[in-house]
Amino acid sequence: MDMFREWTPGPVAHQFDEQVTKGGTLDVKIARALAAAMTFAQDQHGLNRDAIALAMSDYLDQKITTNMLNSYASPARTDHKITLERTIALAEITKCTELLGFICGFSNTVVVPEKYADVIRLWQLEKAQERLDNEVRSLRAKHGGGK
């Protein structure tokens, strides 16, 4: 019996489903990503926007209101933008790492759990070693093959 036949590994990189941030201007995409992070917090952790605002206020030691969160998450509210420090607080409070993945996506990078850092570094080193080995073989072949 193959116990892993039905198993599918989860995604490694943290990112929203493309439908969340597809289309529209940058400010619309940001508003949808922020709204998705807040929905994630509600669905996964039972945190409504009131609770998120209170937790962000504590985290930042500044007053964050539910109305502010509603404005950040509304594409129609182009006059009310979220700051970087508040985005960080929102990501921390909601535990929505997809929000960080959304931001990193603009520079063609991804967010992966820290536990994978050594595996990624090992892969990088192995690829570098392969390139060096190929270069050494090429130079040896060019100059008579001696060690």
Image (tube, grey):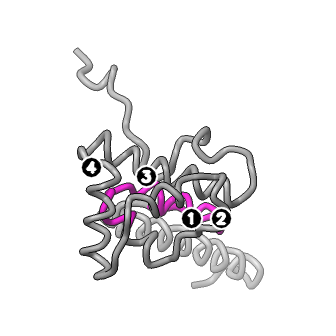
Q: Secondary structure at mark 3?
A: helix
Q: CA distance from mark 2 to mark 1?
A: 6 Å
Residue 94: percent from left, percent from top: 33, 57
Q: Quadrant of residue 113?
A: bottom left
Q: Nearer the viewer, residue 85 or 61?
A: 61
Residue 96: percent from left, percent from top: 38, 55
What is the span of residues highlighted in magenta in the rendered image?
90-111
Mark 3 or 2: the one toward you: 3
Mark 3 or 1: the one toward you: 3
Q: Amino acid at mark 2?
A: Phe
Label for residue 47?
Answer: 4
* Residues at circles 2 and 1 in contact by the CB criterion of under 8 Å: yes
Name the residue tied to disc 2.
106
Residue found 38% across the figure and 40% down from its top: 10
* Residues at circles 3 and 1 in contact by the CB criterion of under 8 Å: no
Q: Is residue 21 left or right of residue 68?
A: right
Q: Amino acid at mark 4?
A: Leu
Q: Earlier in the sequence, mark 2 or mark 4?
A: 4
> In the image, is residue 92 above or below residue 34?
below
Name the residue tied to disc 1.
103
Taken as a whole, is the magenta stretch helix, strand or loop?
helix
Q: Earlier in the sequence, mark 4 or mark 1?
A: 4
On the rendered image, what quadrant is the N terminus found in? top left
Q: Secondary structure at mark 4?
A: loop
